[in-house]
Amino acid sequence: MKKPTVPWAVERNALEQALESNTIKGLDSVEAENRLREADENKITHSKKITFGDILWEEVREPLILMLLVIGVLYSICLAGIATAWMEVRKNLTQNRT
């Protein structure tokens, strides 16, 4: 039994022939059991539950997010260095005045 790749684009008679079926009568119980044995049951498989941690890890691995994090850390380090240097300058200026 060769299944059509796009069944919605096939005429009804051609689809019935391709699926070896009848849209009016359906399948008899023997043919239904044979097809069930051949193709296995049509069950939805349950996938892994997505957690907040999974989403967070996936987002952190994005290149743009990584770049923003690195720039943020570097900016904080530079800003802290500038602030420390400015405090030293102010401290020296106030000491020199007295």
Image: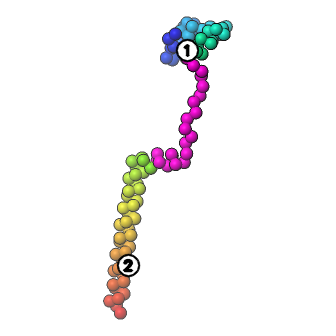
Q: Residues within 10 Å of mark 2 (few under 14, many from 20)?
A: few
Q: Residues within 10 Å of mark 1 (few under 14, many from 20)?
A: few
Query: Looking at the rendering, in which quadrant would you find the C terminus?
Result: bottom left
Residue 9 visible to the viewer = no
Left or right placement of residue 14 versus residue 32 in this view: left
Residue at point 36%, 61% (across, down):
74
Q: Residue 52 appears at what percent x and percent y? A: 54, 48
Q: Which residue is disc 2 drawn over?
A: 87
Task: Residue 38: give its label.
Answer: 1
Task: Tell me which corner region of the image, top left, top right, bottom left or bottom right, holds residue 29.
Answer: top right
Q: Residue 5 appears at what percent x and percent y? A: 49, 17
Residue at point 36%, 82% (across, down):
90
**Label 2 near label 1: C-beta < 8 Å?**
no
Q: Residue furthest bottom?
A: 98
Q: Nearer the viewer, mark 1 or mark 2?
A: 1
Name the kind of residue labelled 2 in the image: Met
Secondary structure beneath disc 1?
helix
Q: Residue furthest front?
A: 37
Question: Magenta segment: does it hold 74?
Answer: no
Residue at point 40%, 54% (across, down):
68
Question: Magenta segment: does it hold 58?
Answer: yes
Bounds of the magenta segment: 39-59
Left or right placement of residue 30 versus residue 52 in this view: right
Name the kind of residue labelled 1 in the image: Glu
Which residue is nearer to you in this view: 47 or 17?
A: 47
- The residues tagged by marks 1 and 2 sit, at their Cα atoms, a distance apart of 79 Å
Q: Residue 80 appears at what percent x and percent y? A: 38, 70
Which residue is nearer to you in this view: 79 or 37?
A: 37
The colour scheme used to paint the residues is rainbow
Task: Tell me which corner region of the image, top left, top right, bottom left or bottom right, holds residue 40.
Answer: top right
